[in-house]
Image: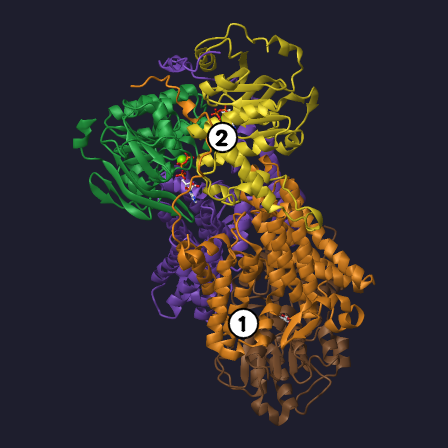
Chain colours: A yellow, B green, C brown, D orange, E purple
Amino acid sequence: MTQETQRKPLLTGRNLVKRYGRVTALDHCDFELYPGEILAVIGDNGAGKSTLIKALSGAVIPDEGEVTLDGKTVHFQSPNDAREAGIETVYQTLAMSPALSITDNMFMGRELRKPGFRGKWLRQLDRPAMEKFARDKLNDLGLMTIQNINQAVETLSGGQRQGVAVARAAAFGSKVIILDEPTAALGVKESRRVLELILDVRSRGIPIILISHNMPHVFELADRIHVHRLGQRLCVIDPKNHSMSDAVAYMTGAKVPETELEPA
Amino acid sequence: MTQETQRKPLLTGRNLVKRYGRVTALDHCDFELYPGEILAVIGDNGAGKSTLIKALSGAVIPDEGEVTLDGKTVHFQSPNDAREAGIETVYQTLAMSPALSITDNMFMGRELRKPGFRGKWLRQLDRPAMEKFARDKLNDLGLMTIQNINQAVETLSGGQRQGVAVARAAAFGSKVIILDEPTAALGVKESRRVLELILDVRSRGIPIILISHNMPHVFELADRIHVHRLGQRLCVIDPKNHSMSDAVAYMTGAKVPETELEPA
Amino acid sequence: GSHSQDVSACLITKTDTNPFFVKMREGATAKAEEIGVDLKTFAGKFDGDHETQVQAIETCILDGAKGILITASDTSSITGAVQQARDAGLLVIALDTPLTPADAADATFATDNYLAGQLIGQWARAQMGDAAADAKIAMLNIQVSQPTVGVLRNQGFLDGFGIELGDPNRWGDEEDPRIVGQDVTQGSEEGGRTAMENILAADPMVNVVYTINEPAAAGAYEALRAIGRENDVLIVSVDGGCPGVQNVADGIIGATSQQYPLRMASLGVEAIKAWAEDGTKPEPTEGKAFFDTGVGLVTDKPVDGVSSISVEEGQDLCWG
Amino acid sequence: MPSDTDNYETVVRERRAEKVAEFEEHHRGFMGNVQHALHVTPSLVPLIVLVASLILFGVLLGSRFFSPFALTLILQQVQIVGIVAAAQSLVILTAGIDLSVGAIAVMSSVVMGQFSFRYGIPPAVAVVCGLAFGTAVGALNGWLVARMKLPPFIVTLGMWQIVLAANFLYSANETIRSQDIAAEAPILQAMGAKFEVAGAVFTVGVVFMVCLVMVLAYALKHTAWGRHVYAVGDDPEAAELSGVNVKMTLISVYALAGLICAFAGWALIGRIGSVSPTSGQLLNIESITAVVIGGISLFGGRGSILGTFFGALIVGVFTLGLRLAGADAQWTFLLIGVLIIAAVAVDQWIRKVSA
Amino acid sequence: MPSDTDNYETVVRERRAEKVAEFEEHHRGFMGNVQHALHVTPSLVPLIVLVASLILFGVLLGSRFFSPFALTLILQQVQIVGIVAAAQSLVILTAGIDLSVGAIAVMSSVVMGQFSFRYGIPPAVAVVCGLAFGTAVGALNGWLVARMKLPPFIVTLGMWQIVLAANFLYSANETIRSQDIAAEAPILQAMGAKFEVAGAVFTVGVVFMVCLVMVLAYALKHTAWGRHVYAVGDDPEAAELSGVNVKMTLISVYALAGLICAFAGWALIGRIGSVSPTSGQLLNIESITAVVIGGISLFGGRGSILGTFFGALIVGVFTLGLRLAGADAQWTFLLIGVLIIAAVAVDQWIRKVSA
Ligand SMILES: Nc1ncnc2c1ncn2[C@@H]1O[C@H](COP(=O)(O)OP(=O)(O)OP(=O)(O)O)[C@@H](O)[C@H]1O
Ligand SMILES: Nc1ncnc2c1ncn2[C@@H]1O[C@H](COP(=O)(O)OP(=O)(O)OP(=O)(O)O)[C@@H](O)[C@H]1O
Ligand SMILES: O[C@@H]1[C@@H](O)[C@H](O)OC[C@H]1O
Ligand SMILES: [Mg+2]
Ligand SMILES: [Mg+2]
């Protein structure tokens, strides 16, 4: 990965701190994402992974520290700011409106309007186009067991919901895609589709941050692995030089990494 | 497992049907759980696994079909009925009250009262006892990164929440314990603890229904595997005679099982 | 404060959204300033809100006032608090509405609401002549709780019109078929219009309309105008506010019984001042339990046997 | 026991052109179709209750009730509540509540009246000022809710008191008479203008109410803004995370509600002829009642504005029907209470049967 | 690339006596401690607002306000609202709302009065009948909400109209005079009995209110029932799934609320001396205001009943303070509106700073 050390990171966090009352979820944490890579973030439950990516995507405003995108410091005030900058996130809690349909949820905040007068003046939504797009994206994930694209999201099974969220991010992310445990509720087949999708996305040149507890998946996909422990980045490892056992040992504290940080 | 064929099933479902509007989530499905076993239920997303266990645990009232416990037909009208019959369930959605504390949630519906006058007449809760118990159970799961047992559940990370729910079921189940994807959001270490806990529970003689998408875990623990597909039981396989590839092939429809049902 | 030499007094009205009480307050404030009384004003939140009035009385006692002028929202419920004030050495004068019993207050300056109703009833009957025998009467009352002011005017009207009353303490129990409908209006234009429409839907041939007050009358008129019957229906009302009297002039209302809130207010303020200075209490009108501040029937079409004043006179005396 | 190392994922590695999974379609038949329609069209249930109550009173009262006069009278009587309830629906869909609707309507009408008569501003301009006033108060509500994150109930409760008191202080409790308005500023009564179609009398206000409901129904269903209103009401955090500008959506909803209430104030002048600062005191409770009978959840995100419209009509039908059937005011009040509960019970029952 | 088959799970196979994970404890200091206290005790915020408003009026008005008499007067003036708001809190904690509280209170007092006077039932028995009546209406509310699954807003709105109209019909709008009650049924006025402690005047009703709040605070915090009330309000489905008897909890809450309202009705007789069917019309809005100023969420499951108590007192302090300061009624009304919003804004601000 030495070629990468020359490259400038696309998205960074420096010294990020986030406290919730007595709990320090992020404790002076650093972070880098390089162009075109798949970076996995692993760590115990409660280590602060979700908080870290929320701080990067505007969903949480860190108490201290700074975030840069393309070398420029950014101050996202809301996830919308981050989305406008091209960062698309699938949150662990999925962030969907239960009573609305799958299509509505996929296009939330970037709806398509009918062409011509009806779209421009009556601001009418182009439902057929939106439905077709949604159906295609779900098909890609092998989620065609969903019987009705206009079904309310609250009537979907846990895995189906996750599939919809991932499809949404993959369809719209332009600069960075962040996936917080995207396959947690997915079946074997559906997980596999998501992994393929992640590789598809990378081949479009878009870097991905992947949080996952599934070590085989992490080691299969990741270019680099950020190991998170007790609110901090413990080390970054190269999956080609480390075993899954090493990674698990680091993140659980069973073993201390030799060098604090591997060359990133 | 021939010795088991002689034994009477503890919990059965016959011909269960559940429709949601246009969707048929359970389509004349059968089910058996034998005493002392770990039965895994696997299937694609949306196959109807959660609906099946909800029908068994009173959370959903099936449109058709019957459920028996210990050979007697039961008509659970609410999860409470099932709990009183000794069936404890961890639902996929976890079923916790976000604003209440971990302790409150663990003891919901079976709170401990202070001994003597204060408990009997003032009906005062025995908080210290409840807190100690909760702390011990979470310790068993290695969830001591939870810093405060009186933290509101909504402030826990996804994995921490799941840990609390599993600890609750394991602590109170007396006849059957049902776990719907108990490790989906858990880290490597925490998942391992849950697996150990499941084995602990079985060694106490209590049978377990385990829904999981994690094949290695399923094959490690299960005595029998119920493969669910399109709202029905496709087959029941013995993990000792089948490979994970077989199981995945059956549940995704890539392969059709030879005999409709293996001897259970 | 700077008025420490002054006598201080309180005025507590039923509401201060009804122009009647607004004018009463303005009159009292002007009088108080003129004779050097420090006046604080209070009001309930809606007509019938006696709890807020109780709180106001307590505040006045606490504040060291010499006397209280009150238009009671509930004439008997308020007596406990009034007694407390009197025990604390305050002079309590009921305005507009006598307490039950009337001697619960030290004095009362009020309109005779039953008489106000009677006058418009008599006038309407005389106006119709023989047709009164098969009149079709709509009664637009105040609200479902049947407060005394509404009952007195309603029953007074029916009595004046020559209709046999049932229980004189409530409306709605009369048997006379000439009453084609009763409804409630909240004493507002909107309520007046809706209530009138409801009764018209039941019987479009209504020809006499009693209204609790002039806003309700204005609303009823709009409903009649909407079906083109505004010219063949007689509307009578109570109050004598300036817009109401103008409506009499314009022929919208046939006659209205005028009350004199300014007179009540200034008499009340003077009485408290007098009492603070030499301990004299005002006396009630001969033959009545209260000091009657009078009521005048305002109409341009006087009838025999019912004394009335002209619209011009009414306009001179009108309030608000 | 097969080893942990069984490479089972290869089974799903190649993407097969898989037949789309389909469950046995449960045979529907007529009742099934009805149930499905009820399921996907939430406003159908209040519509059924409305039709049932029309039939009930039609049978009870015959042509007295089933006349063009009586039926259009109901429309006229519900127009103010109907307009205000449309505003209330928007706010309630965002999981808020607006207790200031009545006060805004009345104060807007007072602004229109006083600006014309006290300051001699051209009446048409005064109307615009009144509409602007309503919008401004609504926007202030929205700002307090969205930016200051105060609970809508409290914001609008406080605003209700403030606007109502300001209304009385500003108007000095003076009514502007219908005759004066007709003479000098007839445009203030424009919403009361009548026209007849085959014995049925409609007013501009009634037409406005119907158009308003249709436009809002369209906007809620077929524009991005409408979808965002639902999303915000459903789960504001999720909406924010998935890219909705929650704050602007909320502010726009409250401001629009204020504007609609100001229109209701204008319609109020049309209906009662005069400008009276004491009007509209029951609009809060009546509008919320219409919304809830119409099936919109007070927890936001669910229901349709057409339902609200039917809800307002249901109350109107019962009120007039009971009065015509001879119930006195107190009994009408009591029976409306029973019917509010019954209407919603029927609603629940239909939903359950059709679930 | 390491193989998929790396048996990484062995790393975590043996359970190690692991040191409990601890994050660096953020240094707290004085402000930190204050913030923490605010965080864990939700009723502290309204308490602070209350104390601030007491100080404000104390400075403005001096000893006229800061006398034992004036301060206990506030208690007397808020007692009815305070009692009813306690009932309202319970219902709102379950994510419901009770619009029938005022009507239940009044009708219960009418039952107590009319049973004694019209039927000559011994007054003590009549009081019990009144309490039973309130409980029954509350239980009916609860039954409709829990069993019939009707929205609480609608159920209690309908019940409000029904009970209020029944109240007027049954009482024939007659007030039972204070003097008659004192002579023939003094127990009806028992809640109004006064006693003095060092210049401060207390009534039995005030003591009842304070005790009621304490008992309910205890029950909500330290009994299983109380925890279930919160759980039901938080997420009824989750509560049901985790073993709470949601229906019985709801019915018990509404029935208890009815009983408490009936006590409020009794206290009402004590306060005004007479039995008047027109009392209590503002209790709905006033009790809800107290609850919300006290920091209980209208969406259920969050807040404390002590907060409600302070909320009621805040309104009482402002009302008396403004009156004493000489503000006229409309200005008082307007300022209370401003203060409702301001109190909650301060509350939000404190919470934000202490988050
Ligand atoms: N809103 C909140 N309020 C209080 N504490 C919080 C909040 N959100 C997270 N925390 C705490 O911060 C810590 C880190 O949480 P976070 O969700 O980032 O963990 P995570 O690494 O994503 O865990 P998991 O793998 O279980 O998802 C946890 O201890 C959690 O309890
Ligand atoms: N409340 C509901 N309303 C409508 N449809 C529902 C409802 N609950 C479940 N379904 C539908 O029933 C089918 C089965 O859902 P279920 O949750 O049982 O699947 P599952 O096998 O547990 O899937 P997963 O592995 O993703 O959890 C799905 O198609 C789902 O959309
Ligand atoms: O006398 C008053 C009357 O004139 C007003 O219209 O309503 C209230 C009454 O007390
Ligand atoms: Mg996480
Ligand atoms: Mg499931």
Image point 22% across, 35% down: which residue? B10
- Using the rendered image of the protein, determine whether residue E179 is visible from the camera's viewpoint: no
Q: Is residue E341 above or below residue D243?
A: below
Q: Is disc 2's CB within 8 Å of ligand 1?
A: yes
Q: Is residue E26 above or below residue E265?
A: above
Whole-percent x and y of residue D311?
A: 53, 61
Q: Are marks 2 and 1 on the same chain?
A: no
E276, B177: nearer the viewer: B177
Disc 2 marks which residue? B155
B83, B20: nearer the viewer: B20
**Residue closest to the far bottom:** C130
Whole-percent x and y of residue E83?
A: 47, 51
Q: Is residue B165 above or below residue D181?
A: above
Q: Is residue A247 above or below residue A59?
A: above
In the image, what residue type sits under mark 1? Leu
In the image, what residue type sits under mark 2? Thr
| 3D distance between C-alphas at marks 2 and 1 | 53 Å
Image point 54% across, 83% down: which residue? C179
Q: Is disc 1's CB within 8 Å of ligand 3?
A: no
The answer to which image quadrant residue B180 occupies is: top left
- Whereabouts is ligand 3, in terms of quadrant? bottom right
Disc 1 marks which residue? D320
